[in-house]
Amino acid sequence: MTRNRSVAVFSGEQLGRYGFGDDHPFGEDRMNAFWDEMCCRELDFQVRIFDPSMAAEEDLGRFHTADYVAKVKACSAAGEGILDYGDTPAYHGVFEDARCVVGTVLDAVRRVMGGELYRAFVPIAGLHHSMPDTAAGFCVFNDVGVAIKLLEQEYGLQRIAYVDIDAHHGDGLYYPFEDDPRVIFADIHEDGQYNFPRTGFSHEVGKGPARGRKLNLNLLPLSGDGEFFEQWQMVEEFLNRFEPEFVFMNCGADGMTGDPLAHLHYSPRAYDRAATALCRIAETFASGRIVAVGGGGYELRNVGRAWSAVVNAFLEAPAA
């Protein structure tokens, strides 16, 4: 099978620094876990590797309030404080580290839109709980939220698909864009009755002009590949109906068996199937344009296996 020669992975020490210490579930060792698996599978020689980038402060303002950005900056300089209700502590440099996550995703999007890249993966990204005015769930700045605003404001896109298979609902993308018809939102996650952030129920389908353009699918604890595949068919049908011009994928590894912060039992096959299907949809409607972000995942072996499955699928999926 011909491997796609224009798949990029963004990697580097600065991007890997985003994390909250060894005693926190979101540590700084996730990048290494991913890269070790990439090397074991010899995928590192098959992708184009790009360094991280730093977002301009004005880019943060596309999604976040000025007061919140200033708060993060001040707590970062002081090296102390809590940025949400307790899960997301500040540390020296968190402002710069979080800006790097955003900047790297923006760089990936700009390169894909410019035709330099075809498919891109940013492992330390997908901070999908951050809201415009607060951190949440280990997420300081919402990188994809900023990137969606970029696509709307600079490129004028009218149908941007955001597809999230992280075990936790992407509330930081759903609610800020709940009434935005340009964002085609599809999220499969563990039922909010049983897990953080306790949102994302099936009746949440968007509001106003966006009603019917959002899809939330809930899985019961202990669900595995079979249950995922049943729901995934609905995601494909939903996306095909709206013909997206750009595709984002959040491929959080916390749906894998054994993750300490969720109760699902996916194997890497779920990630392969989702990534392969999204590449096909991107080929059909979006000139192939797709950017994946790593999202969550708190068992290191699973992080490497899930994310490498996505990169491999990007390499193998047929190109136009």
Image (tube, grey):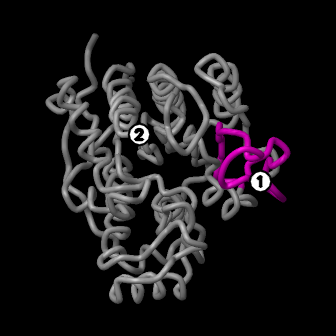
Question: With 192 as the anchor, is 232 left or right in this view?
Answer: left
Where does residue 52 sit, x and y in percent of width and height?
Answer: 24, 58
Q: Quadrant of residue 232?
A: top right
Residue at figure coordinates x 61%, y 51% from the top left? 170
Q: Quadrant of the N terminus?
A: top left
Question: With 130 as the anchor, is 33 left or right in this view?
Answer: left
Q: Which mark is residue 210?
A: 1
Position above or below: 54 against 292 = below
Tell me the SS state at disc 1: helix
Q: Earlier in the sequence, mark 1 or mark 2?
A: 1
**From which residue to which does the magenta span run?**
181-209
Tell me the SS state at disc 2: loop
Is-magenta flag for residue 204?
A: yes
Q: Quadrant of the C terminus?
A: top left
Residue denoted by label 2: 299
Where does residue 82 sit, x and y in percent of width and height?
Answer: 50, 78
State which mark lies toward you, 1 or 2.
2
